[in-house]
Amino acid sequence: MLHENIKAVRKSKGLSQQELAVKLNVVRQTISKWEQGLSVPDSDMLISISEALDTPVSTLLGETVAETEADSLKAISEKLEVINLQLARRKTMGRKIFHWLLISLCAVTAIIYAALAAINSPYLGWDYSDPETAVLGTALHSFEWLFVRAAPVILIGAVIGIFLTRKKD
C-alpha cells in the first residue's frame, strides 16, 4: 500500500521523516500521517514525493508498469481516490463501533442502577464485626459509593457521545 511504500523508500534512501518533510516543505507530522495511512498526499504532492525520493510514482503506488505522463496522472488520481475511500470506510466503521460501545455503556449503567435498587443497599445494615463479611461489605460500599457519584457523569457523557456519533444523513 502507498503508506508502506513511502516509508520503505524513505528509509532505503536513508532519510528521516524530518529530512523528507524539509524537502517537501511540509511538517514532519504530515509525513508521519502518510506513513501510518491516516491520510494520503494529493497527486501533485505524490509527484513531489517521488522526485524527492528519486523514485517513480508507480513504485510508490506499488506498480512497476511504465505508463505515459497523462495516463500516469489519471492512474495516480484513481489510486488516491481508492485510498481515500478506504480511509473513509475505516473512519465510518470506527465511528459505528464507538457509537455502539456508548450505547452498551448506557445499558450497563442502567442495569447496574437497577441491580443496586433491587438489593436496596445492604451495606448500610452490614455486620462489620465479622472479618470475612466486613471486607465484602466495605468493597460493596466502596463500589456503590463510587458508582452512584460517577454513573450520572458517565451516563450523560455516553448520551452526548451517542448523539455526536450518530449517522449523519
Image (tube, rainbow, N blue to C red):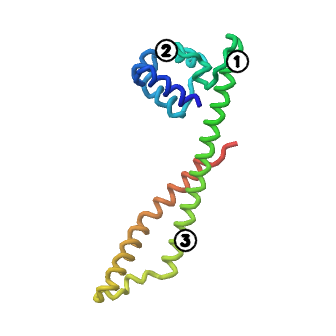
**Is label 3 in a helix, a strand or a loop?**
helix
Question: Viewer-proximal residue, 63 or 93?
Answer: 63
> Quadrant of residue 60 in the image?
top right
In which quadrant is the C terminus drawn? top right
Q: In the figure, 155 relative to 76: above or below?
A: below
Disc 2: which residue = 52
Residue at horizontal 36 percent and vertical 80 percent from the top: 136
Of labels 1 and 2, earlier in sequence is: 2
* Image mark for residue 111: 3
**Is label 2 in a helix, a strand or a loop?**
helix
Q: In the figure, 33 relative to 117: above or below?
A: above
Q: In the figure, 163 relative to 64: above or below?
A: below
> Quadrant of residue 90 in the image?
top right
What type is the residue that disc 1 sits on? Lys
With 110 as the anchor, is 14 left or right in this view?
Answer: left
Residue at horizontal 71 percent and vertical 15 percent from the top: 71
Disc 1: which residue = 74
Residue 94: x percent and y percent? 58, 46
Residue 120: x percent and y percent? 47, 82
